[in-house]
Amino acid sequence: MTNGRTSNQALPLPAWGIRLESRKVDSETGAIKKMPPPGELIVALKQNIGVPAETIVQPGERVLKGQPIAIASRWGLSVAVHAPTSGAVMAIEERPIPVAGGGTGESVIIEPDGKEERYAGYVAQMNSKRLPPPQIRNEIMEAGIVGMGGALFPTATKLNPGSGIQALILNGVECEPYISADNALLTERSDQVLRGAAIMLAALDCDECLVAVKADMAEAQAAVQAAIDALGDDRISLVVVPAFYPAGGERQLIELITGKEVQAGGLPWDVGVVCQNVGTAAAVAKFFDEGEPLISRIVTVTGDGVGTAANIEVMIGTPIVDLVEFAGGYTDDAAGLVMGGPMMGFSLPHDQLPVTKATNCILVAGQAELDPSVREMPCIRCGECARVCPAALMPQQLLALARGPDYEALESQGLQDCIQCGCCDYVCPSYIPLTSRFIEAKQGLWENHLVSQRSALALRRFDARGERLERRESDRSDELQRQVDEIGPAGEIDADALRQLKQRVKSKKPGDKT
Amino acid sequence: MKFASNAAPHWLGAESVAVLMRQVLYALVPALIVLVWFFGAGIILNILVAAVVALGSEALVLRIRKRPVGLFISDYSALVTAVLLAMSLPPLTPWWITATGTVFAIVFAKHLYGGLGYNVFNPAMVGYAVLLVSFPEDMAAWPLPRNITPDQQTLSLFTVLQYWATGSVPADVTVDALSAATPLNSVKGQLGMMRTMPEIVGDPLFGNLAGHGWEWINAATALGGGWLLYRRIIRWQIPTAMLAGLLAPALVFYIVDPATHPSPAFHLLSGGTMLGIFFIATDPVSAAASNRGRLIYGLGIGIITYVIRNWGAYPDGIAFAVLLMNLAVPVIDRYTRPRIYGHGA
């Protein structure tokens, strides 16, 4: 399926996308630093796409490192959440959580005791690759593992595509500037990633795995190749992906590697592919190898606004303020706080927010690092946005339609296919915030759908009422008819009566007096 | 610590509209130098008039429309329109003609349609077309280029200014100095008189490949255009397609009957060909949106230009070709939308 491009040769350049300065040097140097438990952990219960986990601990209870504190909800897609370290549950309450647009979420507040006492409920399993696939998936679900590239999709669900999967793609592309968490992971712990890959292959019953690394990450490439050679597993190979943004988008990566397109509304399964982040694979390996569920992750803390940029392995729930402190604190230049990269990352209003399973990067930007919003000019239809759009949309046309807004046309021209990568904003000479407009338009489209659904429902109700009335009417006439039928054919009664009347009339001669 | 919130993306990588427009102006400098060399300083007067009128009328309309005057005036788009129009006009054009064309370009073609980004037609070409139908004689009045004949009269700057200001000149100025036939005009007229191409191009008005002087003007324009391509301020689709649309029929007819059809090289280096290819047709606002659409758009302009040059009433056809294809843009856009990722094959 990969047309023989399974060796570590670079793929052809995509027709879309942009080249961005990588700015990864700062945090690339130096080993992954491990941050000790902070004074307080804020462990959000909703750390996955779907519904939040349900707590099984009480305030005041002591929890151990790795102990489940919330289990997957039965009410939808959900995964368990674990205590990142040993300590006391101080409270279970709503806390601000880092999500786009801001918001709060129920969180378990843990005060670490510093003992790092481990929960004994999970043990290392050496035969992990020989476990039956359903059991592997159950354990991954149990371990609270979700897509760590930022999507937070429950990994076990993604590993359950049925048969016909030809390749597992491990996404280590990390195409956004600054972020180097996956790069550091691959450089230092490729073996762990590959062990995770082998377990995932077993769960998928698939025997090809491609580890995708970006062309400008030479160290990570070398480390992956060395780990592949050391492992001697010929099912796993390295794929070098062009240093283009957004080559790391799931659909874009699949298109680059396999040449296949995942249809709108479809899933990578449809083209025989499952895509997982390298960090997710490492988390899987960690659970099976060491019995440690997903309680920590690598976060790139970088930017001119932070003392020493670094990749830091940090407990889920660590407040960002503590994380920044660990990285040397704020510099005088600190002007912006972004979770994620400069293209798709979102602004954080303050630093009292916890690290979640989705936090791959905390960018503490200096004054000059982020572009301020510029006064926008009208679109001059230069078409650069369409040239770079990875979904082959025409953002300049969508923009005009969004002004209306003409929802029907927006939908037919692919508004829903926009992946919000921000490439169009980046190349726009009129500095139009296209992505924001499209997000708004999607919201509008959604509401419009609701309204039309509601009106469709009202129409159905109206029609139903009409039918009901009609039915009642026809029921009534049926009932009448039935009564009439019961009494007897109306015609005969009339005929008899008429005959009798006629006889009576005939029996009376004219002139006769009655 | 608290921080300001901004919507993603947080990086912007493009140069502004104003910067792009300025580059277009820079790219016109080589052509301007060669134009002045062959036809004198009159073209500078055109540019000055057009620039002043363009900026003035733009500011006025922006004020009437209650738009930020400073923001839009500084985008250089009115200036680009003015310079393109001015460089299309004969070097000896009385100021009111230039001013009329500019007002039509800025007020009617641009702002009545909504201003920057909303104009359906190329403003400079609207101005040009208005002048072409309103002042046909003046618009055809190109003087002889430099160095055609040994006894050629060169106009003094004073005479040029006099003509520019009043539309008339002292009696001792010859007609040729004021208005000679352009090569395109000459070819059209003389072919009509049953002369053949080899006979026609024997005239000193012609150089090696096309009109004397015009070859160099077009070459210099192409140089600027090439720079715009290199800077990626324009993309290759429209220029290439327009080139193909003009050259393909020119080549076919030239092969079939070279006696009555100018060579492809002549078409390439005559009149406004290069200005049209690199600076007029590539105006993104009034052009088709998609790459495929732009190929069709450019091809159409090239073909219509050839048709007008060959069979039409006007010696050059770029302005009308561009305006006609501007009209076709909505249809082209509708049928050339690229297939969206994940929809079909």
Image (tube, coloured by chain):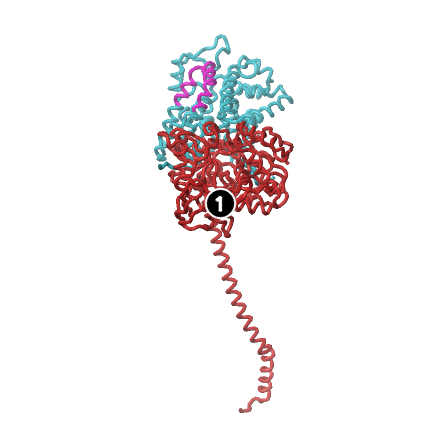
Chain colours: A red, B cyan
Query: Residue A308: where, in percent of width, then height?
Result: 41, 29
Which one is in front, A507 or A177?
A: A177
- Give the residues in magenta: B22-49
Furthest residue to the top? B150
Up/down of B282 relative to A260, above or below: above
Residue B30: percent from the left, percent from the top? 47, 17
State the residue at coordinates (42%, 20%): B93
Q: Is residue B104 visible?
A: no
Report which residue position mark 1 lands on: A119
Q: Is residue A77 above or below residue B268?
A: below
Q: For mark 1, name the chain.
A: A
Question: What is the crowding at mark 1: few (fewer than 14 residues within 10 Å), some, or many (at least 20)?
Answer: some
Residue A417, x across and y down, in percent:
52, 40
Residue at the bottom extreme, as displayed: A513
- What amino acid type is highlighted by mark number 1? Tyr
Image spot of residue A24 (x, y percent): 47, 29
